[in-house]
Structures are given as structure tokens and as C-alpha cells.
Amino acid sequence: MNSLEQAEDLKAFERRLTEYIACLQPATGRWRTILIVVSVCTATGAWNWLIDPETQKVSFFTSLWNHPFFTISCITLIGLFFAGIHKRVVAPSIIAARCRTVLAEYNMSCDDTGKLILKPRPHVQ
């Protein structure tokens, strides 16, 4: 391969990588929004559950039964984490980090958007 073909291959790889990372951004934003909303609901429900004077007087399960907003939001949050939301909210950075690992062998790297960064070749003496 001559240098022109190599440059074209690098540009094609960079275009595909930036396209893929950009494609993940809308879904990542939605998952982040869902996580924030459910976390705020859980925190609000927990606050109301903790400041309720009845919570100290009844059993644990009865207090959860008396606060369905907290119970449902907490179960939803746990379910989202079991479903892998913690990976979905950072998916583009996981892809970029894995690409950096592979590209390091070729004296290259990439930023968080997928743009390639060419590093100078090490001088061997």
C-alpha cells in the first residue's frame, strides 16, 4: 500500500468511528435522562420516607408499603442497573477507550468524538 491508500484508509476509518460514536449520542442522552429522573425520584421518595414519623414506629415492610412512590422508584432504579443502564450511559466513552487501546499499537489515538490523533513515531537508535 502506498501512503495515499493508507491515508484514505485512515480517513475512512475515522469517518466510520466518528459516525458510530455520533450515532450512540442520542440514545446515551436518553438513558442519562432516564437515570437522572429515576435517581431524583428515588432520592425524593427516600427523603419523604425518612422524615415520616410513622417510619420509626412500624416495621420495615410496612413503612415501604406506606410509601409506594419510594418503593416503586427504588425498584425501578435497581432494575435499570440490572438491565445495564450504567454501561449505556457511558457507551461512547467505552468505545473510544477501547479504540485508544487498539490504536496505541499503531502510534495513534482518538478523542472522545472518534477523531484520530497521529502520534510521532518513536526514534530507535
Image (spheres, rainbow, N blue to C red):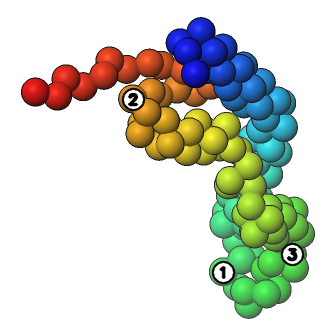
Checking the image for residue 69, the label placed there is none
Asked if residue 94 lies left or right of residue 57, the reply is: left
Relative image position of residue 74 (x, y in whole percent): 77, 66
Q: Nearer the viewer, residue 101 or 31?
A: 101
SS label for mark 3: helix
Mark 1, residue position: 56
The residue that mark 2 highlights is: 107
Q: Which mark is residue 66?
A: 3
Residue 73 in percent (x, y) is at 83, 62
Q: Nearer the viewer, residue 5 or 110?
A: 5
Q: Secondary structure at mark 2?
A: loop
What residue is drawn where x is 74% and y is 26%? 16
Residue 70 in view in this figure: no
User: Residue flagged by tag 2: what amino acid is it?
Assistant: Asn
The image shows residue 9, relative to residue 27, as above or below, that is: above
Label 1 residue SS: helix
Name the amino acid type tagged 3. Asn
